[in-house]
Image (cartoon, rainbow, N blue to C red):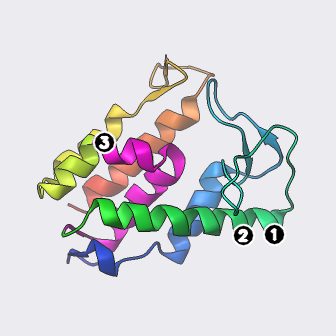
Amino acid sequence: MSRTRIAVAALSLSASAFVGIVVDEGYAEKAMVPTRNDRPTVGFGSTFHEDGSPVKMGDTVTPVRALVKAQSHVARTEKIFQQSLAGARLHPGEYDIYMNWVYQYGTGAWAKSSMRAHILAGEYRQACDALLLYKFSGGYDCSTPGNKVCAGVWTRQLTRHAQCVAMQ
């Protein structure tokens, strides 16, 4: 693993991180609402179609089209993510972790996040720790032991946090 941080503008999501995103998201042939108060998603967690129109309940997708949608989503998100971190540097692995987060929570949440502020300030460990602040879904605390509402949200944060801390 590289310990060298690289300008964010020179990085891109790794193929293994892309596979990780689609595995984390899981595949849904028919649009569904993954957690309470969330937007409808289809395929591998896509909330929008390639043309930018929102996913609606009743929409369907094949596995191949779902991968195309996910790649399109990543490409759009990646540009916004890179612009939000102008001048910042990350390890390639950190980049993958935060892009995974942005794929799940969106660029709007990223722009307001303390993770972004910490990265811009060069506070990399604090940025890792800030991942743990995102433990709510639909107003529910997903870190509540034994919850069956959104346990996966918290599990994903714990995994991201452990991976991020290991890179410091």
Q: Are marks 2 and 1 in contact (CB under 8 Å)?
A: yes
Q: Is residue 149 left or right of residue 26?
A: left
The amino acid pointed to by label 3 is Ser
Q: CA distance from mark 3 to mark 2?
A: 28 Å
Residue that numbered label 2 is attached to: 68
Range shown magenta:
88-113
Q: Secondary structure at mark 1?
A: helix
Q: Is residue 50 above or below residue 58?
A: below
**Residue that appears at 81% across and 69% down:** 64
**Residue that appears at 30% across and 42% down:** 113
Earlier sequence position, callout 3 versus callout 2: 2
Q: CA distance from mark 2 to mark 1?
A: 6 Å
Q: Give the label on residue 113, or none.
A: 3
The amino acid pointed to by label 1 is Val
Residue 21 at x, y percent in the picture: 57, 58
**Residue that appears at 41% across and 61% down:** 80
Residue 22 at x, y percent in the picture: 64, 59
**Residue that appears at 35% across and 67% down:** 82
Q: CA distance from mark 1 to mark 3?
A: 33 Å
Q: Is residue 143 above or below residue 124?
A: above
Is label 1 or label 3 in front? 3
The amino acid pointed to by label 2 is Val
Q: Give the label on residue 84, or none.
A: none
Decide whether the magenta segment is chiefly helix, strand or loop. Answer: helix
Mark 1 neighbour density, 10 Å: few (under 14) some (14–19) many (20 or more): few
Q: Are marks 3 and 2 in contact (CB under 8 Å)?
A: no
Residue 68 at x, y percent in the picture: 72, 69
Q: Secondary structure at mark 3?
A: loop
Taking the image as drawn, is residue 128 in sight?
A: no
Q: Is residue 106 above or below residue 132?
A: below
Residue 103 at x, y percent in the picture: 52, 53
